[in-house]
Image (cartoon, rainbow, N blue to C red):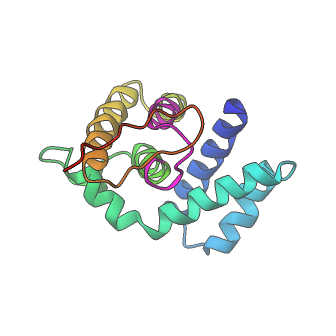
Amino acid sequence: MSLNRRKARETAMMALYAAELSNETLEHILETVIKPRLQDDTKLREFANALFLKTVRDSSELDEIVSEFVTNWDVKRIATIDRCVLRLALTEMMTFEDIPTKVTINEAIEIVKKYSTSKSGKFVNGILDAASKKLTEQGKIIKKGSGLITKSLPRS
């Protein structure tokens, strides 16, 4: 399933990239980017659609999170692919409770290494690692499901 999910994540990244660089409607991007690449697998297409749409919807909030971890650097100056991958990974961490944070980060690193620069993997890893710690402390990342270790909160 992981390689299939990676294809869905890559497709969502391509859709987000298309949305960043074009004036096309979200519906058009869903129909021309996501649907053709994932037409044979309804579950993966639904995952990619949800990931893409939630990321677009929350892009301002996601950019605020990223900006906390890039010192003296405007989020808009981050390479477009890197910015898309960061947004998607943050969305996945905060929205999909059944996907372990480490899996999301590792997938983001692999995707950005494939589609961006040689330095992008370390850059994305550093931001996502720091962001995941802070978001977990803030209660914005909550993971549930089989195979996930959840820390119980101390009772007060």
Q: Is residue 154 left or right of residue 17?
A: left
Question: Is 57 rendered above or below residue 130?
Answer: below
Looking at the image, which residue sits at the far right? 40
Identify the residue shown where x is 31% and y is 53%: 139
Q: 113 or 41: nearer the eye?
A: 41
Side of 66 relative to 39 (left or right): left
Q: Position of residue 110 (x, y in %)?
A: 52, 28
Residue 58, how many percent across, how many down? 42, 66
Of all residues, the one furthest to the front in this rendering is 156
- The quarter of the picture where residue 32 lies is bottom right
Q: In the rendered view, would you say 12 is above or below 102?
A: below
Report the front residue among 120 and 124: 124
Q: Position of residue 27 (x, y in %)?
A: 68, 73
Q: Residue at x 78, y 58 (%)?
A: 35
Q: Name the residue at 48% across, 36% down.
A: 108
Number of numbered discs on residues: 0
Q: Nearer the viewer, residue 65 or 72?
A: 65
Which residue corresponds to the image point at 14% horizontal and 44% vertical from the top-left? 71
Which residues are the magenta region? 93-109
Horizontal placement of 141 versus 76: left or right?
right
Horizontal and vertical percent for residue 94?
Answer: 43, 53
Image quadrant in which the N terminus is located: top right
Residue at the left extreme of this rendering: 72
Q: Provide the major secondary structure of the magenta segment.
A: helix
**Does residue 135 appear left or right of residue 93 in this picture?**
left
Instruction: Find out whether residue 41 is within the magenta segment.
Output: no
